[in-house]
Image (spheres, helix red, strand yellow):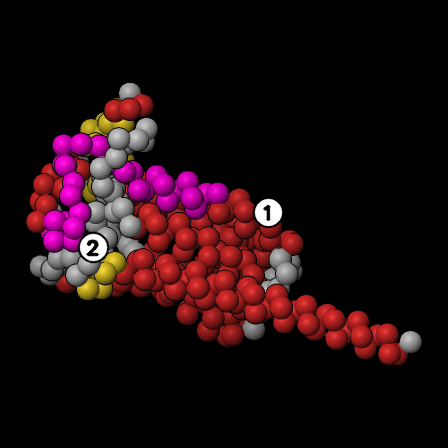
Amino acid sequence: MINHIQFPALGLEFTVNRVAFSVFGLDVYWYGILVTAGMIAGVAAGLYRAKRIGIDIDKFTDVIMICAFVGIVCARIYYVAFAPFKYDSLWDMINLRDGGLAIYGGIIGGFISGYFACKRKKLNFADCFDCAAVGFPIAQAIGRWGNFVNRECFGTNTDGLLGMISENTISYLKSVQSTLRAQGVIVNPEMPVHPTFLYESVWCFIGFLILFFYFEKRKFKGEITCMYAVWYGIGRFFIEGIRTDSLEILPGIRTSQIVAALMVVFGVIAIIYFRKNKTEKKDKTNVGKKHKR
């Protein structure tokens, strides 16, 4: 449960225990605490923005609860479906205590369930999605530190300032040497590696600040959602490229990079289309007003 993590270039060393505390003999893990903390922060940010634009908070809270449940289930299904190993039992498939939540599964499940929940609650789904999209990156920024405690989500070797090394990085990389070589990736297990969890946490936090403060300047309903898709997609595409524990749809084809690329493409197309459409409608309205005069 205890691991020693070093950042040699920074002269930092941490002793990390995955267990935060125990209750009646049941261990409570930092991973779960941090993921939960991230969700709470994300919900708080989303509710703040929802209140500012006049969304019924009670109804929106109901939507969030539905999306959170479906999102967690889908995040686990996504991870299990693309995991590079087989599970021994059904319990292993549903056991979240050791981690194993794929954010893309959560996003997909959350948005699909959110669409129908908004329809049922008679809420504008584009407004609700924008509020949720503000909360997603801060939830991810905090939740990624659960990967740090679990000693997962790291990349290839680096001699950079942020290079990290631990017992877990060494043992894991030694166990997947043949798999990585087949992908054309050469890694020295005894050398520091990229802390990709940290890269993504910082990227998401910056994205949160941009979306949170830009919200009131949005050009159309749904723009924040599209901006989130583009921002996160760009960061995840490049970060995923240096990870050594990627989920693959086929050998050598990283699932998350495909999804990230699609998010960026569709997000950019949507922003261009809806901004152009709004501009054209505004021009037509102005022309109509001139004729009435």
**Residue 160 place in picture, x, y as percent:** 30, 31
> Looking at the picture, how far across and down is residue 4, in whole percent?
20, 29
Could you tell me which quadrant the N terminus lies in?
A: top left
Q: Nearer the viewer, mark 1 or mark 2?
A: 1
Q: Is residue 236 left or right of residue 78?
A: right
| Residue found at x 45% / y 49% | 137
**Amino acid residing under circle 1:** Phe
Q: Earlier in the sequence, mark 1 or mark 2?
A: 2
Quarter of the picture containing the C terminus is bottom right
- Residue on which the image places disc 2: 95
Location of mark 1 (residue): 213
Task: Relative to 272, say whether 5 is above or below.
Answer: above
- The residue shown at (48%, 47%) is 207
* Crowd around label 1: few <14 · some 14–19 · many ≥20 (10 Å): few
Q: Is residue 107 magenta?
A: no
Q: Nearer the viewer, residue 11 or 275?
A: 275
- What range of the chain is rendered magenta? 179-206
- On the rendered structure, is 244 left or right of 113? left
Closest to the observer, 97 or 16: 16
Secondary structure of the residue carrying numbered label 2 = loop
Q: How many marks?
A: 2
Q: Is residue 192 magenta?
A: yes
Q: Name, please, the residue furthest toward the front.
A: 184
Q: Secondary structure at mark 1?
A: helix
Q: Residue drawn 22% across and 37% down?
A: 157
Q: CA distance from mark 1 to mark 2?
A: 37 Å
Q: Which mark is residue 105?
A: none
The kind of residue on which mark 2 rests is Asn
